Amino acid sequence: MYVDIPFLKALKKEALRSGHSVFYPLIEERLSVYEDVGDSAFFPEFMFFEPDYYAILIYLLENSVQEPVVDIGCQFGFQSELFEGWSYTGIDNNRSLDGRRFNDSKPGVEYICGTFPDVEIDLTDKVAISNMSLGYFACGRTEKDLAEHLAPAKMVFMRAPKKLTDALRGKFISCQELLPSSNPKDYGVGMDCFAPLYCFSNPITAF
Ligand SMILES: C[S@@+](CC[C@H](N)C(=O)[O-])C[C@H]1O[C@@H](n2cnc3c(N)ncnc32)[C@H](O)[C@@H]1O
């Protein structure tokens, strides 16, 4: 799906306003393979990622960033649909998603099934995304260790517990808030579970 900034801004505004998925109806006809998952699974999951991924894409387009995107904790990878024109690699360790990764036969889209950072991926100069993924699930690594593995990336878009975003601050010069924290009360979990969506980056080198 070709996306441009005005379209993404409209989607983001409506998703934030309504609290519902505006993306789901756009790809609904292609979701028959997920029928057993049921609608109830879709609504929370789509709602999770939508405004965040729109904000990330708007940032990439506004700053002419075209480096390959690596989406850690991509789940089904529905968001791959939005990254037309980028190389998109989704990583997820949930084996129940096998054979059902969205757009997996589309050129430029690939998936790795495994646990980051124990997967074959070189993040050097790439755009890494970890949205509601790293920091929430045990992976046998400390926050410091995860930050070390993310540090080679050109930029990291992250919504994660504060302990992990704090660890990443030491690895990048700039930390920009793209979207505020969700309200933890909506999810019945502690304050430390939710943080803003940040973009960590280093200044672009001028030649
Ligand atoms: C709540 S979903 C988030 C999906 C999507 N990023 C979003 O924002 O809607 C978290 C996903 O991250 C995956 N995950 C968590 N830790 C991971 C790790 N270390 N490596 C790979 N996948 C991981 C889980 O299997 C799960 O599918």
Image (cartoon, rainbow, N blue to C red):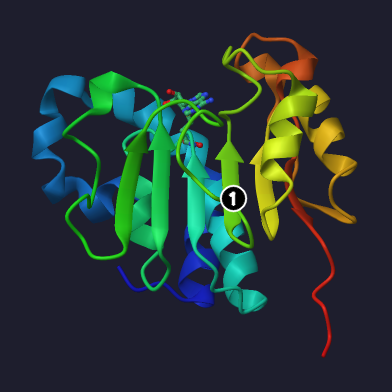
Residue at horizontal 50%, vertical 57%?
A: 69
Q: Is mark 1 within 8 Å of ligand 1?
A: no
Look at mark 1 in the image and give the residue it sits on.
128
Task: Give the quarter of the figure containing the C terminus.
Answer: bottom right
Label 1 packing within 10 angstroms: few (<14), some (14-19), many (20+)? many
Q: Nearer the viewer, residue 13 or 163?
A: 163
Q: Is residue 83 left or right of residue 59?
A: left
Q: Is residue 111 left or right of residue 53?
A: left
Q: Nearer the viewer, residue 88 or 55?
A: 88
Q: Residue furthest left?
A: 32
Residue 4's spot in the image, x, y percent? 46, 76
Residue at horizontal 52%, vertical 75%?
A: 6
Q: How many marks?
A: 1
Residue at horizontal 86%, vertical 32%?
A: 166
Residue 195's spot in the image, x, y percent? 75, 31
Task: Say which amino acid is labelled 1.
Answer: Ala
Task: Give the quarter of the figure containing the N terminus.
Answer: bottom left
Residue at horizontal 75%, vertical 35%?
A: 147
Residue 179's spot in the image, x, y percent? 71, 47
Residue 181 visible at all: no
Residue 137 visible at all: yes
Q: Quadrant of residue 169?
A: top right
Q: Quadrant of residue 45?
A: top left
Q: Quadrant of residue 94?
A: top left
Q: Is residue 40 above or below residue 149?
A: above
Q: Residue furthest bottom?
A: 207
Regarding mark 1 in the picture, which secondary structure is present there? strand
